[in-house]
Image: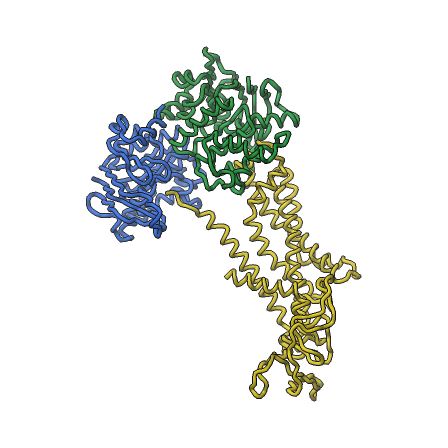
Chain colours: A blue, B green, C yellow
């Protein structure tokens, strides 16, 4: 098992009376698997993803649970310096809005290089060629030009692909993608979804795909977890869940995305 | 015919570059001819940059078109006089995409709804106003203490419903929905679509549904028009366009939106000289490709 | 910190408004026998150490060998402090007659809380009266320049295009002119036979006409982006007139910036007036303003032998600081906290 989230509960610090943000969440991700966490806004799906990366808002606190990576270490128990080493190299994240995820005053290439510089000791030239290789692999047509461009000079689709390149740079075992296609046009969206599928097939990587749109992940994911009000209410192999959803909430979601 | 657009164009110049500014002409809407009949729902689809939002705002008369003719309820509204414009504004309203900004956050709901009555003659009395507001709010499923609250106290879906209520205060004939469901979760989208269907028969509305989300368009629209780069490439009955898309761009759009697959990579659209659409029978028109 | 500022301003403005009542003397009440008399402390114990009702010792003046004035405390003369003392009649704001003051001493005793100036006028009283000019010049000036700035900025930002261009060029012309020199030049144009009130008004008007440009530019920038908001488009689609949209939808959203800008620019009016009066071009004797009072402190002789004469400067400092502190606090209160809100959970 690549990642096991067990009994995870998160609440706002100091607000015991208000309910928890997420409670008793169990998620399992195997190697080379695409797992979808689906729910409405406020269901806790993003909190779950951020908790894995230990990037939760400082106002929130984990009150229970473990997040076990590769059946070995509990990410929640690691010291901050260890976690820093894992972020980017073993687990990385792709966010919803690529424009705000990139630093606007630095070129895209520089920012992807930074990932290499922080985690490896390769020489500069080698880093540059690796970055450009990844830009090409995610389907960016002119990697050299994009390498030297600033985020605002690229189209939305290119930016998102650059962000995926940055996430893939050190060949992590898990990518957490939080609504990665919400700001994109449908054709771009389809391309990014296909890119994820390609990555799953050619690289040794799993993807945790967080979204509110069940339709997006129907074809893409192997397993699905449905969240509502902070809890996982249904989960299983996607073919089974979509064919015979048990919970009425899941049925409603499926009906909403039927075409 | 409720709305009839003939050869509408909206061009504007944009300065590109930071120091040496070149003037570039943007053809946001490039020779569009389109018509909507009362009671039918037209879906206007396209990706960002297609010009569909600009076309929507031209129809709403937020700004004038560069050229073309505009007929509403069989009257020439290309350059309306003051009274004509006033009646037009009462007949055509728009629901916007962003529920967080479509209501002024400093206005109470009552004040936002009351703003819709600014054009009404004779000016309705205060007591009548409140009754009307409550009636319309309950038609969109909002009951209870709503009027004295502020937009931030409501969720995105509720705010969209309030925006719909505001539009309905004027008793319009045509309601333009500009990506009205795009910022909402899928379940809330369903809910809003439900309300829209119910309101349509109750208030005798016609919808112009502008969206890039074909799934939603398929659920509510009887006719569909596809726009790319300011031009219309295909239109017709929803069943025809969805099941048998003719133009390569439409086909690519359908595959991406409904099957989440990419179709043709690097699609190059051939723009013929004439922008007239060819009739393929059954009301299904396509641009020559 | 901002509470401190608000308290200070509260005290200063109360003092200024009720100067007639609070100060022991009128601003023009002079007694040349007591020129540059040092402060007369209010005592509660007499020389035997017994508690007494607050009083003031008399002061005698004699000339020393260099014909300089030397003031000595004469403990034989005791003048008790009187509350609600009856004095010469005066008129609050020139309208409401009154004849009592909060505290003072009977003649021939003199109560110089903070010392006397060259003509024997009580500095404490003069500072209170001076506050009227210095403090209110800011308020009045700001209300004029901000009204102009908001309207012009709002129109330029909302309409854009040519109107925006023209208005902004006019704005820049105003901003180009070095403010202080323009002030001097315009002041020279004011007829010399204006009485002090008219001079005051004309100074305010002049300052206001210079000051609107900076605000107009910022408001215009804000309006340019605000006009694209959906609620503005909705209002247009519902038939609201442009003027109504600017007044009801756009300008209220610039409020958070505007109020802070107002708070932070009042001090510059206070300082401008002080500078002008210091040079003798503003409020003239016998009327008092803090800048005017400071002009009497421009000689080394005065500062060395009558250092209390510099006190008006402290008041200018205090009021400017108070406005700045409150302005900062308002800005902090309005901006980040409202924008953080809830993170995407």
* A239 shown above or below A178: above
Residue displayed at 32% across by 35% down: A38
Percent position of residue B75, x then y = 61, 19
The answer, for residue A121, to whether it is visible in the render is no
Residue at position x 56%, y 22% from top? B8
Q: Is residue B247 left or right of residue C172?
A: left
Decide which of C48, B28 is in the foreground and name it: C48
Q: Is residue C40 something one can see in this rendering?
A: yes
Where residue B267 sits: x, y (%)? 41, 24
Q: In which image quadrant can residue B66 be found?
A: top right
Q: Position of residue A172 (x, y in %)?
A: 27, 41
The quadrant the N terminus of chain B occupies is top right
Q: Splitting the image into 4 quarters, where does residue C10 fall?
A: bottom right
C59 lies left or right of B71: right
Residue closest to the eye, C270 or C1? C1
Total marks placed:
0
- Viewer-side residue, C30 vs A149: C30
Residue ranking furthest to the right: C193
Nearer the observer, C94 or C226: C94
- Image location of residue C125, percent across then percent down: 67, 71
Quadrant holding the C terminus of chain B = top left
Residue drawn at point x = 22 percent, y = 40 percent: A2
Q: Which residue ends up furthest to the top in the rendered image? A: B281
Q: Is residue B198 above or below residue C160?
A: above
């Amino acid at each position: 098992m690549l990642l096991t989230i067990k009994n995870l509960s998160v609440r706002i610090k100091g607000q015991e009376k208000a309910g928890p943000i997420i409670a008793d969440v169990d998620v399992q991700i195997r190697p080379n698997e695409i797992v979808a966490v689906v729910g409405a806004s406020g269901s806790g799906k993003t909190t779950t993803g951020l908790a894995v990366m230990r990037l939760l808002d400082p106002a929130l606190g984990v009150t229970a649970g473990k997040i076990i990576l590769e059946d070995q270490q509990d990410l929640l128990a690691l010291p901050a310096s260890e976690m820093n080493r894992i972020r980017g190299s073993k687990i990385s994240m792709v966010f919803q809005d690529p424009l705000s995820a990139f630093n606007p005053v630095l070129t895209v290439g520089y920012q992807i290089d930074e990932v290499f510089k922080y985690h490896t000791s390769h020489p500069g030239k080698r880093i540059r060629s690796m970055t450009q290789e990844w830009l090409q692999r995610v389907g960016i047509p002119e990697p050299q030009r994009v390498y030297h461009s600033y985020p605002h000079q690229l189209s939305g689709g290119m930016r998102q692909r650059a962000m995926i390149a940055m996430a893939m740079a050190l060949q992590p075992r898990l990518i957490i993608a939080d609504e990665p296609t919400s700001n994109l046009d449908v054709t771009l969206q389809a391309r990014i979804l296909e890119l994820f599928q390609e990555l799953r097939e050619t690289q040794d990587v799993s993807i945790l795909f967080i979204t509110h749109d069940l339709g997006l992940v129907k074809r893409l994911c192997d397993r699905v977890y449905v969240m509502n009000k902070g809890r996982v209410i249904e989960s299983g192999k996607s073919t089974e869940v979509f064919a015979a959803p048990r919970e009425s909430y899941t049925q409603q979601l499926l009906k909403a995305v039927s075409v | 015919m409720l709305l009839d657009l003939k050869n509408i164009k909206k061009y504007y110049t944009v300065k590109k570059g930071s120091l040496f500014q070149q003037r570039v002409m943007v053809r946001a809407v490039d020779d569009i001819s389109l018509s909507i009949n009362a009671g039918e729902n037209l879906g206007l689809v396209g990706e960002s940059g297609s010009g569909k939002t600009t076309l929507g705002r031209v129809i709403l008369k937020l700004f004038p078109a560069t050229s073309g003719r505009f007929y509403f309820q069989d009257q020439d509204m290309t350059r309306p006089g003051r009274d004509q414009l006033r009646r037009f504004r009462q007949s055509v309203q728009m629901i916007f995409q962003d529920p967080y900004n479509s209501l002024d956050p400093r206005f109470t709901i009552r004040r936002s709804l009351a703003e819709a009555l600014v054009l009404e003659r004779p000016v309705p009395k205060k007591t009548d106003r409140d009754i009307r507001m409550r009636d319309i709010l309950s038609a969109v499923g909002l009951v209870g203490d709503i009027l004295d609250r502020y937009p931030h106290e409501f969720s995105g879906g509720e705010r969209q419903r309030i925006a719909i209520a505001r539009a309905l205060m004027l008793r319009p004939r045509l309601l333009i929905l500009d990506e009205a469901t795009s910022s909402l979760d899928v379940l809330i989208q369903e809910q809003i679509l439900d309300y829209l269907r119910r309101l349509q028969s109750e208030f005798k509305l016609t919808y112009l549904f502008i969206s890039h989300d074909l799934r939603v368009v398929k659920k509510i629209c009887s006719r569909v028009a596809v726009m790319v780069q300011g031009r219309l490439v295909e239109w017709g009955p929803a069943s025809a366009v969805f099941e048998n898309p003719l133009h390569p761009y439409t086909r690519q759009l359908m595959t991406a939106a409904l099957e989440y697959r990419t179709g043709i990579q690097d699609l190059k659209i051939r723009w013929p000289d004439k922008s007239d659409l060819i009739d393929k029978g059954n009301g299904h028109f396509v641009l020559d490709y | 910190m901002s509470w401190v500022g608000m308290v200070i301003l509260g005290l200063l403005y109360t003092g200024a408004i009720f100067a007639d009542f609070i100060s022991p003397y009128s601003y023009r009440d002079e007694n040349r026998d007591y020129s540059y008399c040092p402060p007369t402390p209010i005592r509660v114990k007499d020389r035997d150490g017994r508690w007494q009702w607050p009083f003031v010792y008399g002061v005698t003046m004699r000339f020393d060998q260099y014909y300089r004035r030397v003031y000595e405390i004469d403990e034989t003369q005791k003048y008790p402090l009187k509350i609600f003392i009856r004095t010469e009649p005066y008129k609050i704001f020139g309208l409401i007659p009154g004849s009592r003051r909060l505290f003072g001493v009977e003649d021939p005793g003199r109560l110089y809380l903070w010392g006397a100036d060259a003509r024997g006028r009580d500095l404490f009283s003069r500072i209170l009266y001076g506050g009227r000019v210095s403090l209110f010049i800011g308020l009045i000036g700001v209300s004029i320049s901000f009204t102009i700035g908001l309207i012009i900025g709002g129109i330029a930002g909302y309409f854009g295009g040519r109107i925006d261009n023209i208005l902004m060029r006019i704005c820049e012309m105003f901003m180009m002119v070095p403010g202080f020199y323009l002030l001097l030049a315009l002041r020279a144009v004011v007829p010399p036979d204006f009485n002090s009130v008219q001079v005051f008004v004309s100074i305010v008007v002049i300052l206001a006409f210079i000051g609107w440009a900076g605000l107009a530019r910022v408001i215009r920038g804000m309006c340019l982006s605000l006009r694209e908001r959906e609620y503005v488009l909705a209002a247009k689609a519902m038939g609201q007139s442009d003027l109504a949209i600017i007044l009801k939808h756009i300008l209220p959203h610039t409020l958070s910036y505007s109020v802070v800008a107002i708070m932070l620019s009042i001090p510059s009016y206070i300082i401008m007036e002080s500078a002008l009066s210091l040079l003798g071009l503003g409020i003239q004797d016998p009327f008092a303003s803090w800048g005017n009072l400071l002009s009497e402190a421009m000689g080394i002789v005065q500062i060395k032998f009558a250092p209390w004469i510099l006190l008006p400067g402290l008041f200018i400092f205090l009021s400017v600081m108070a406005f700045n502190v409150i302005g900062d606090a308002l800005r902090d209160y309005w901006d980040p906290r409202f924008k953080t809100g809830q993170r995407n959970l």
